[in-house]
């Protein structure tokens, strides 16, 4: 039964880039023997600095990068080895939200159509019902339905990130991978989106993988975290525990680097 | 919140409209040449040979733009010439664009060996001199109008193939294409919904800007005598016919040259204007 | 005790910068927008003044008005700066608004240095960093021998400095590039350093190093710093005084400690309360107004939980300990 409640199981995964067949290029190890296990309905944070491999790990979970070695189970399937039928199931059950809220929306489609796209691809319901579903999704992420006919460049960063979340939720996924979803947003908007994530997780029991460099964000909404450095996971554990009592030197350095007020 | 930035150039609204209007007028005049031409374009009238245009000495309203050495009315011939030249250029352009876009799309999306083969072919066509290719084709296949169209298409397709392939390679890496893939979008869907519409604006600009080039190519061939054959009127042919009479009857070459220059200039203006205005992201 | 405000340490000195009713407008193709709408601020010598605000609040436009360095597409002819910014100098002072180009060049070369967010854009990719530092030295009228170049690079703690004088910008990491930019700023021994989100693109560990570098430079050279950021934690760790911008206006300014522990303006309170990681985080609803739809009176009123009928008129500036806040609620 232990396996049943584990939504994500990554074991000894290694990913390296480069090293061409014809041209000798140095290989870069983006992930080095990484293992990770996340329970269903939990929020797990991947924390690290640029080049730590946290984004690569997220892309491995999404099935966008194939690991060189190691085994991988995401929502009951192995994204590196999917049959045609499993691919459709996998795509529906694992969704993502990225940092750059503008670039992930096609500039030539209205945001309503972008949200509808997943429903169209998987032929969810009659075409007429899909519009109603889009309206419901807009309402759910706190957007006025009047915005559905707008184009991405006509919305603010926060609104676009809500659109992305609506699109990710459109297929009722089991797992959401969010790669720095707050970094490009203003403080007050960050807070709004953070609350939205928390609300949605409460309502749907979604499993969330949050990739972030911001320890405070990770501490606020993650149950468990992995700290990555240079492609390796250096520390894992409960979010509050890891940041309050870091065991690894690097985690300690990270925690110390967060600016502290002069007056405390 | 997106701040609408000032465009690099002020929108030349009035200018663009005026250019469009003039060009439309010229195209319509060519299209309805049989209805509005005052004379039969190939009717020879030895009595009024080399008559000057109406504003020159001895000009008459019978032939507003004068006549050529065989007494044919230049206004009528210019109208019919626009008709011929436009038809050949348009069909040639469509042929080259369809060929180039298709091969470019295949090349960019398929990659691998297919990509290398198509790009190798592109390189071959870039290195071959255009004129040589055209003359060889015409020498082998004859001077029918369809030969001209096909040869013009063959000379120009590589430009479209390169543009489309480059755009596809860039667009393929765009985050919104990746987002569609994580939703489970198929390759065909990605190509049709996400890549093609985003190709539209560079393509429209390129088509508008290369139309005058194709027009000039046809004119050049006809001028050399290997394009449109007499007595059919085409702008290049008319300029070529008037070559020997430049001193005595400048209008024989002058009238078709002016028409050609006007059309080329108008297209260039419209192409520039379209390029500045077409990007959806530039509008608030 | 930490010196909470520079003005306490240097009680009677003339402010380094006195800005009065500064307005910055940008001419667009079809209209004019006002990015900064009447800001009064003073900056003491050697003080670190933090400016916080969300994107579009005018914080960056305000600072760039000091040296007329508004980036493209806002060229000089598209940018309209009004009001007065006086820079105190040994010989009486310079008015920066509307200063002739030659004066502005001298000010940029010798008095006010700028550290941009993206260090890569501040460096020429084709010239070794040593030569770029040398150029900054020459602009300030100092000698650009290799000893002074090295001294500067060592002062900003560029690792392995002697060997890296000939390095190109792309061979340096983001943090190292930012150090070179700061070295170029120091070459001019400026009175004021304007840092526009200098650490936003950097990792936290590197950010911590750059912040302590700026702090140390202030102590050694007495350089005043105008530090612009959207990151409240950075401000709390660095600034002596903090100014909060909203929709092109200065809504509150106070010594950092007082501002964080006792925020008076409703926007400051909401902003502080919406930081992630707080136990009881509050939600600030809505977004800041567009530049062409700023409400009359108090710009924050539509989002303010305490707004009432008075807020449709421009709010008064109410003094508070060591600063001021602009709000009707505080006027009562």
Image: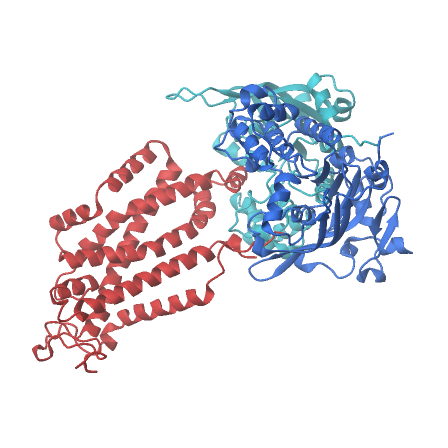
The image shows residue C232, relative to residue C162, as above or below, that is below
Question: Can residue A262 be seen from the camera position used here?
Answer: yes
Question: At which x and y percent is residue C9?
Answer: 84, 35
Position of the C terminus of chain A, as image quadrant, is top right
| Circle count | 0
Q: Horizontal placement of A150 versus C244: left or right? A: left
Residue ID at (58%, 58%): C28
Q: Closest to the observer: C263 or B152?
A: C263
Chain with colour red in the figure: B
Q: Is residue B90 above or below residue C5?
A: below
Residue at far right of view: C332
Work out whether residue C59 or residue A65 is closer to the camera in this orientation and state it: C59
Q: Is residue B165 above or below residue B58?
A: above
- Chain that the image shows in cyan: A
Give the camera-side residue of C134 and B147: C134
Name the residue furthest left.
B46
Q: Could one spot residue A215 in this view of the protein?
A: no
Residue B263, x across and y down, in percent: 30, 64
Image position of A57 with respect to C104: above or below = above
Q: Position of residue C309 (x, y in %)?
A: 84, 62
Viewport quadrant of the N terminus of chain A: top right
Q: Nearer the viewer, residue C310 or C278?
A: C310
Colour assignment, chain C: blue
Colouring: by chain
Q: What residue is rendered at 64% in x and 39% in y?
A: C110
- Report the residue that reaches farthest toward the front: C91
* Residue A145 place in picture, x, y as percent: 65, 55
From the viewer's perspective, is B67 left or right of C211? left
């Amino acid at each position: 039964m232990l396996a049943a409640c584990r939504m994500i199981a990554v074991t000894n995964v290694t990913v390296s880039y480069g090293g061409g067949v014809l041209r000798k290029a140095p290989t870069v190890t983006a992930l080095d023997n990484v293992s990770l296990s996340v329970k269903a309905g939990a929020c797990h944070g991947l924390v690290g600095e640029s080049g730590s491999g946290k984004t690569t790990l997220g892309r491995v979970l999404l099935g966008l990068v194939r690991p060189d070695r190691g085994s991988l189970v995401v929502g009951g399937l192995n994204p590196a080895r999917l049959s045609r039928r499993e691919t459709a199931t996998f795509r529906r059950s694992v969704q993502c939200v990225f940092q750059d809220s503008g670039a992930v929306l096609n500039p030539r489609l209205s945001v309503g159509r972008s949200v509808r796209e997943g429903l169209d691809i998987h032929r969810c319901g009659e075409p007429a019902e899909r519009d109603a579903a889009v309206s419901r999704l807009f309402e759910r992420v706190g957007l006025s339905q009047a915005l559905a006919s707008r184009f991405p460049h006509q919305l603010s960063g926060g609104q676009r990130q809500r659109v992305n979340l609506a699109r990710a939720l459109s297929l009722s996924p089991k797992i959401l991978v969010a790669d720095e979803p707050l970094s490009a947003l203003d403080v007050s908007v960050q807070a709004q989106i953070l609350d939205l994530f928390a609300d949605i997780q409460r309502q749907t029991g979604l499993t969330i993988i949050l990739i972030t460099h911001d320890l405070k964000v990770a501490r606020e909404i993650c149950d468990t975290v992995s700290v990555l450095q240079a492609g390796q996971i250096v520390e894992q554990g409960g979010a509050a525990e890891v940041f309050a009592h870091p065991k690894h030197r690097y985690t300690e350095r990270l925690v110390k680097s967060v600016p502290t007020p002069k007056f405390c | 919140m997106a701040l609408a930035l000032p465009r690099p150039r002020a929108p030349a609204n009035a200018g663009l409209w005026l250019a469009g209007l003039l060009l439309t007028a010229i195209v319509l005049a060519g299209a309805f040449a049989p209805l509005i031409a005052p004379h039969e374009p190939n009717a020879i009238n030895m009595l009024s040979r080399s008559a000057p245009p109406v504003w020159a000495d001895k000009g008459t309203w019978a032939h507003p733009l004068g006549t050529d050495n065989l007494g044919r009315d230049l206004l009528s011939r210019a109208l019919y010439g626009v008709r011929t030249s436009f038809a050949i250029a348009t069909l040639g352009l469509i042929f080259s664009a369809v060929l180039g876009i298709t091969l470019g799309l295949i090349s960019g999306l398929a990659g691998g060996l297919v990509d290398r083969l198509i790009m190798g072919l592109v390189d071959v066509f870039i290195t071959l001199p255009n004129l040589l290719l055209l003359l060889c084709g015409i020498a082998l296949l004859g001077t029918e109008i369809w030969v001209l169209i096909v040869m013009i298409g063959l000379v120009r397709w590589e430009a479209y193939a390169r543009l489309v392939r480059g755009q596809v390679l860039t667009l393929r890496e765009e985050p919104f294409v990746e987002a569609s893939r994580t939703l489970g979008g198929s390759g065909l869907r990605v190509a049709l919904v996400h890549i093609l519409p985003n190709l539209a604006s560079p393509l429209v600009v390129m088509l508008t800007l290369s139309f005058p080039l194709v027009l000039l190519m046809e004119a050049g061939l006809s001028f050399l005598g290997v394009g449109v054959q007499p007595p059919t009127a085409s702008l290049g042919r008319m300029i070529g016919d008037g070559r020997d009479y430049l001193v005595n009857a400048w209008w024989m070459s002058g009238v078709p040259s002016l028409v050609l220059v006007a059309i080329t200039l108008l297209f260039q203006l419209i192409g520039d204007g379209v390029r500045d205005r077409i990007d959806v992201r530039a509008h608030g | 005790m930490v010196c909470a405000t520079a003005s306490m340490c240097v009680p009677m000195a003339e402010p380094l910068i006195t800005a009065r009713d500064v307005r910055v407008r940008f001419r667009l193709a079809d209209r004019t927008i006002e990015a900064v709408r009447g800001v009064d601020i003073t900056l003491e010598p050697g003080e670190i003044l933090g400016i916080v605000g969300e994107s579009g609040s005018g914080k960056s436009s305000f600072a760039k008005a000091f040296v007329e360095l508004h980036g493209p597409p806002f060229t000089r002819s598209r940018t309209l700066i009004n009001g007065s910014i006086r820079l105190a100098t040994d010989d009486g002072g310079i008015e920066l608004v509307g200063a002739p180009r030659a004066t502005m060049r001298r000010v940029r070369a010798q008095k006010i240095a700028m550290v941009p967010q993206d260090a890569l854009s501040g460096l020429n990719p084709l010239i070794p960093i040593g030569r770029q530092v040398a150029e900054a030295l020459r602009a300030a009228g100092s000698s650009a021998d290799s000893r002074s170049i090295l001294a500067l690079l060592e002062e900003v703690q560029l690792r392995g400095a002697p060997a890296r004088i000939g390095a190109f910008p792309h061979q340096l990491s983001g943090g190292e590039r930012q150090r070179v930019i700061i070295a170029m700023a120091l070459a001019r021994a400026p009175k004021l350093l304007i840092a526009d989100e200098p650490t936003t693109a950097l990792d936290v560990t590197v950010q911590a190093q750059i912040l302590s570098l700026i702090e140390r430079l202030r102590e050694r050279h007495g350089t005043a710093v105008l530090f612009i950021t959207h990151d409240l934690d950075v401000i709390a760790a660095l600034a002596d005084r903090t100014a909060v911008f909203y929709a092109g206006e200065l809504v509150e300014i106070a010594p950092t400690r007082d501002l964080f522990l006792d925020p008076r303006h409703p926007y400051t309170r909401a902003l502080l309360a919406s930081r992630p990681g707080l136990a009881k985080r509050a939600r600030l609803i809505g977004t800041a107004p567009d530049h062409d739809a700023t409400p009359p009176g108090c710009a924050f009123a539509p989002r303010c939980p305490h707004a009432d009928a008075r807020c449709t008129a421009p709010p008064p500036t109410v003094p508070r300990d060591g600063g001021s806040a602009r709000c009707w609620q505080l006027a009562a």
